[in-house]
Amino acid sequence: MSKVIGAIAAVVVLGAGGFAGATWYTGQQVDGKLDSVAAQLKGYELIKVSKRDFQKGFWTSTETVTYRFGCDAAAAEGKFLPAGAEITVRNVVRHNPFAAGIDTEFVYSAEAKAELDKVFKGKAPLSIHTTIPLSGDITTSFSSPEATYTEAGKGDFTWKGINGSVQYDRDLNKVKSKVTFAGFEIKDKDKGAMQFAAVDLESDQTRAAEGVYLGKQTMTWAGVNAKFTDSNGEPLDFSLGKSVLTSSSQLKDGLIEAGVNVAANDLVVKGKPVGALTVDYGFNRIDPAALKSYNDLTLKEGLLQCKFDHQADEAKLKSLVIALLKHDPAIKLAFKLKTPAGEGSYQIDLAGKGIQEADLAVPNPMALLPKLDAAVVVNLPRAVVEKLIDDFVPAEEAEMQKATFAAGLEQGVARGLIEPDEKVIKAKLALKGGKFEINGKEKTMEQLMMGE
């Protein structure tokens, strides 16, 4: 029996020792991450660590850090930037290897806490918890509770809360997120009401070898309804139904191609239905390494350093632009408006063809035209424009607006800029090899400038 007890005791001791070792190792790993973040921020001007206290322990460590946001020097020079603001965050790090993580809370001043308590009734306005498993992805979850604030004799503000999570690996090579912003409502006795419905966000991004993140993102917005008077006394009366934004990006033959689609439905203004708007935007053949370098120059070396004047970086920017144009990228932008009176569309296509650094050095930008392919296509029923005039222009001005519109169309048709059609406004402009073509007829730059 004593041997069995001794063996069990040995297992317990070894297990405890192993657990203690794992706890120490976990603490070193997590604490080290916080140290590296603090060290990295020392190199930035926009976000600074103004004060940091780190109390290291065996089971837990506590970091209390005050961040200062803002460009104080730029603001002092009168560059229309606000002075900096500070926020204090407390991170309690749990070293238990089976339940390692970080609990984050914001530390408010007594005055700020008193104001927040009026709304959140003593609950934390924002809670953040990070779970760090022995292996696998890290998950950071955050939430803000529902809350209602009532001001006697004036109205209510209802905050419906936020819930979200971000899942990522230790090197941030893969990042997934899912967030629900439940919306808010404003009811003002004198100014009216606004209902801002829920927004759902999902993202799945992977970092490419060149350092840029690629993947898919979706945003779904249930809509908004407002009958309100703004701070200038102007009435707001509109509503928007369900709207969706989707985007995707990937590498194809080593180059980035990406697309964005926006669908905004059931727009109503002052009780008049306007319709639905869709936007499609896409680009391809973008060098990922050049894009990463451009982002670093404008973000890490620009915005994060409170550097807004890039004249000193002009040569570097020009070389990066050339690198971005090296593989003849193409851009497409298309709008569609579906209204009760018909559907209109507007599309632009633009592509580069062998643009070199010497081309950008030429003082005359017209010299670039032979290296650009472009097309603009417009298709809009006249009834759509006339309906918008009837709905949103005062009655005493509507007929004059329609007459002005009709005269403009006649002039456009006479100059060949608009195709002759009694019901639809049609126009096609193309640029290829330095030559212009409008509605199937070739035009020189001189003819366009002279309005011929």
Image (cartoon, grey):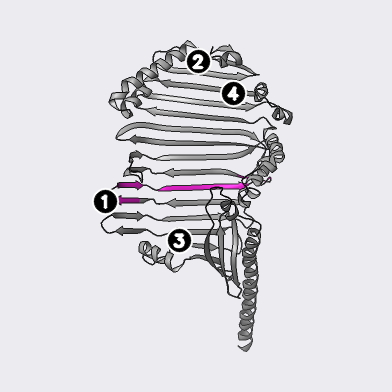
Label 2 sits on residue: 417
Which mark lies nearer to you, 3 or 2?
A: 2
Name the residue located 30 percent from the left edge and 47 percent from the top edge: 193
Label 4 sits on residue: 374
The boundaries of the magenta stretch are: 185-213
Q: Can residue 289 be seen in this view?
A: no
Secondary element type, mark 1: loop
Furthest-bottom residue in view?
2
| Three-letter code, disc 3 | Leu
- In this view of the protein, which residue sits in the foreground, 153 or 426? 153
The correct choice, above or below, for 148 with respect to 324 in the image is below
How busy is the neighbourhood of tag 3: few (under 14 within 10 Å), some, or many (20 plus)? some
Which mark lies nearer to you, 1 or 4?
A: 1
Label 1 sits on residue: 189
- In this view of the protein, which residue sits in the foreground, 243 or 319? 319
| Three-letter code, disc 4 | Ala
How busy is the neighbourhood of tag 1: few (under 14 within 10 Å), some, or many (20 plus)? few
The correct choice, above or below, for 435 with respect to 130 in the image is above
The image position of residue 351, as x and y in percent, is: 62, 27
Which mark lies nearer to you, 2 or 4?
A: 2
Name the residue located 45 percent from the left edge and 11 percent from the top edge: 420
Answer with mark 1 or mark 3, whichever residue precedes in sequence. 3
| Three-letter code, disc 1 | Lys
Furthest-right residue in view?
358
Q: Can residue 33 be seen in this view?
A: yes
| Three-letter code, disc 2 | Leu
The image position of residue 255, as x and y in percent, is: 66, 36
> Mark on residue 126?
3
